[in-house]
Image (cartoon, helix red, strand yellow):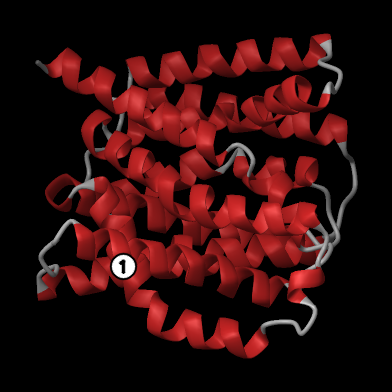
Amino acid sequence: MKMDKGFKGWSSGLMGVLIFSGTLPATRVAVATFDPVFFTLARAAIAGVLAALTLLVLRQPRPARSDSRPLLLVALGVVVGFPLLIALALRHVSSAHATVFVGLLPVATVIFSVLRGDKNPRWLFWLFSLSGSLVVAGFAMMQDIQVSMSDDLLMLIAVIVCGLGYAEGARLARRMGGWQVICWALVLSLPMMLPLCLWTLPGNFLQAAWPALLSLGYVSLCSTLLGFFFWYRGLALGGIASVSQLQLLQPFFGLGLAAVLLGEYVSTMMVAAALAVALCVAGARRFAA
């Protein structure tokens, strides 16, 4: 039963990471056309409307009043904070450069889960986790050595607020369910995000290039909504410390998708780095309990 639960958690978490893998490239494409603030508002508003309809159709009960604060933290972290900060940073830096900081996200998630009361994993877990983050960061820096202090600061803050949103959402998902957590967080932010989205809507929105519109659709439906259905469920079932390490594989999934869909070159270094990260993820899982 325990093994079955862990397998379900990892399978669900892996699906979430696969869905998230196009987030940075899609954001980079979209902010080349749209203002980052409008882009953040739009993705939250679109996902929020879909979340409200989902809750209404499935007749979900309102969350308890005691859940309002955790849901607010989730909304601030993954609905507003992380999307806005990465959109601002990706105006000037590449998605490869941003991957340096995404490699820190699993560590940030576990730190917040421990601070919020979860058991501290063994020291070997931290060794494997930090090693995986260093491999991801090193690989990303070899692809793009561009440095911007202000944009790097934005990405660092984005990682911190997102790690808090992941940890808080995972804890809440244990009793509410993963998809309910993200839906209620989106609905909670909708009264602010939807009016601001309409207010900042560009006059030439419908004339925007199709790559930007498709990117907005992708991050709204997949990165902001559907991906969290699987991600929060995986974190809740498989454990935050263990499943969060799967996100170290996200950059390589993104590059793999680019190779399949766009015919981009897959280097020997990329394969070696992906294998090294996979070993670190397996090691972290082994010592997460």
Relative to 195, residue 147 above or below: above
Relative to 186, residue 272 above or below: above
Relative to 15, residue 82 above or below: below
Which structural element holds mark 1?
helix
Can residue 266 be seen here? The reply is yes
Q: Position of residue 64 (x, y in %)?
A: 10, 70
User: Is residue 180 found left or right of 34 in the rendered image?
Assistant: left
Q: Position of residue 59 (x, y in %)?
A: 13, 61
User: Which residue does the image show at 58% across and 85% down from the upper left?
Assistant: 198
User: Is residue 237 found left or right of 13 in the rendered image?
Assistant: left
Q: Where is residue 22 in the image (x, y as percent from the top left)?
A: 64, 40
Instruction: Say which quarter of the image contains residue 43.
Output: bottom right
* Quarter of the N terminus within the rendering: top left
Can residue 289 be seen here? The reply is no
Number of numbered labels in the structure image: 1
* Quarter of the C terminus within the rendering: top left
User: Which residue does the image show at 43% across and 27% down from the upper left?
Assistant: 14
User: Which residue does the image show at 82% across and 66% down from the upper left?
Assistant: 33
User: Is residue 7 found left or right of 150 in the rendered image?
Assistant: left
125, 263: nearer the viewer: 263
202, 105: nearer the viewer: 202
Residue at label 1?
A: 52
